[in-house]
Amino acid sequence: MQSIMIVLFGVVGMLFGWFVYSKFIAEKIFKMDDSFVTPAHELNDGVDFVPTNKVVLWGHHFTSVAGAAPIVGPAIAVYWGWVPAVLWVVIGTIFFAGVHDMGALWASARHKGKSMGALSETVIGKRTRALFMIVVFLVLLMVNAVFGVVIANSFVANPSAVFPAWAAIVVALVIGQLLKRQVPLIPLCVIGVAILYATIYMGSSMPLALPSEMFGLTDKANWIVILFIYAAVASLLPVWMLLQPRDFINGMQLLVGLILLYGAVFVVMPDITAPAFNTQMAEQTPSIIPLLFVTIACGAVSGFHGIVSSGTSSKQLNKETDGRFVGYLGAVGEGSLALITLVAVSGVMLAMSPDQWHEIYSHLGAGSVGAFITGGSNLISSGWGIPTEIAATLLAVMVVLFAGTTMDSGVRLQRYIIQEWGEIYQLQALKNGIVATLLAVGCCLLLAFGAGGASGSGGMIIWPLFGSTNQILASLTLLVISVYLIKLGRPAKYTLIPMSFVLLMAFFAGLIKLQEYYQQGNWLLVVLDVIVLVVSVLVMLEAWSVIVKHRRGQTQSTQPQ
């Protein structure tokens, strides 16, 4: 089957989602209103709460939620076969991710930009808040610690990506200053992307690398330290200075990358060599159900998106109706990246025959980012005549920049969580941005080097928990949105149905993993997995109690603010 049929199926489905389904949800269910004063205006402080052009905010939101996950997840999950992976990406984007992201953004904006953890107290109760924030902090800790390792590994493996990755920061700082001075957005976008691609070309001919050992640490460990120092500084800067322009320019860079990849599919029309349903899997390969639905998270639905929506994006929303453009279209952008990843790792650009494909994908977990870069660079080279080496550098830089923007936002979000704890428990020291940032980075580095030793790879120890924990968080976010809608007297089935499905799959996956960790004698993961599963059950019970009381008339309806 030609890959163009997969692309057409996905594109038509996502266009329906954007033009029809998202409009219905925004207007009839969330009832977004331009007259509502958003937190960005009400609480404008020039640092975290800043009214932002919706295109620029989309760039921030898109690149923050994307990271490397919409590439890694699909590139691994294709092992079960391309058909279930494509279906989950397309259906998940339309009915799950878009509603989840837009809903979290809307609900947070209606509550002064509170994070989803703090918002759960208002909607459900105090006990829920404490439980919810445990899961949120755990997910952020995993994301930040692991993405530090991912970027460091990429810098070591692809020295050509180092120069363009750091040059993007300089470009972003300049663009931030120019935007502040009301310089038109379009020419800045064109010039910024042009400079970024020029640095990619330069990087391919000017690879940079740290010494293999320095200060008693390996090059990878030194990169991890440097990255967290940068993330700490970046998280304290006003969002308009670095976060917004960097994420925006990265978003535009990805948009160009998607145009190159999708355009190449229509030019080359490569065949698919991967099996529709894999019947030649290695022994002891776990069942596709439920693990497909936690392996592909970003690109279908992801709890991390709710943290970003309610953590940074809601504080920058200029008009409430911009939430549809930022939230839903951000999910569509990520779904588009996941879809083209599936094409890149399934077609003849990766392997010329089914047997060769099976050699690359010998077991679950094989392929991954390397397969995407190989297949994608061959596709771009065949379709556009760009040298394969430059195309590979382009895709490697795309992965690094996305992981970097996610790490930037992740550290800032951890800082918000710690500051919210300071507000909740009246701990003045934690309210200080610098103290909160140092604690956030300190926790990440403690995990990285405390658990991982001199390699700094400690985050990888608890990373196996991410899939089920992240999706449980997505279901809890959808639950909070659903309870809020019920209190408003509005239909909640559009969030309750996705919530129920994601919770069932994630909880089932968590139980399977719990058995696996127990058999391995990995007691740290056993304890953490049990905590997450118990927390999810308790939050569900609390929410059900609130819903029952509301229907009995024992609680007052929540009025839109």
Image (spheres, rainbow, N blue to C red):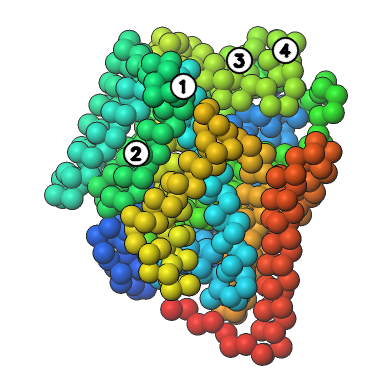
Relative image position of residue 129 (x, y in whole percent): 57, 69
Relative image position of residue 536 (x, y in whole percent): 70, 61
Who's the residue at 30% across and 69% down the image? 43
The mark that comes first in sequence, 3 or 1, is 1
The mark that comes first in sequence, 1 or 4, is 1
Give the Cα separation between the discs numbered 1 and 4. Answer: 32 Å
Going by the image, does 63 lie left or right of 17?
left
Who's the residue at 46% across and 21% down the image? 218
Going by the image, does 8 lie left or right of 312?
right
Q: Is the residue under label 1 in contact with that under label 2 (CB below 8 Å)?
A: no
At label 1, which amino acid type do we have?
Thr
Q: Is the residue under label 1 in contact with that under label 3 (CB below 8 Å)?
A: no
Read off the residue under disc 3.
350
Q: Quadrant of residue 451?
A: top right
| Relative to 19, residue 336 above or below | above
At label 4, which amino acid type do we have?
Glu
Who's the residue at 43% across and 46% down the image? 441
Instruction: Quarter of the image for the N terminus: give it.
Output: top right
**Circle 1: element type:** strand
The mark that comes first in sequence, 2 or 4, is 2
Mark nearer the viewer, 2 or 1: 1
Would residue 186 be seen by someone viewing this image from the given angle?
Answer: yes
Residue 516 or 287: which is nearer the viewer?
516
**Circle 3: element type:** loop
Tell me the tag on residue 218.
1
Read off the residue under disc 2.
230
Give the Cα separation between the discs numbered 2 and 1. Answer: 19 Å
Who's the residue at 38% across and 52% down the image? 437
Read off the residue under disc 4.
359
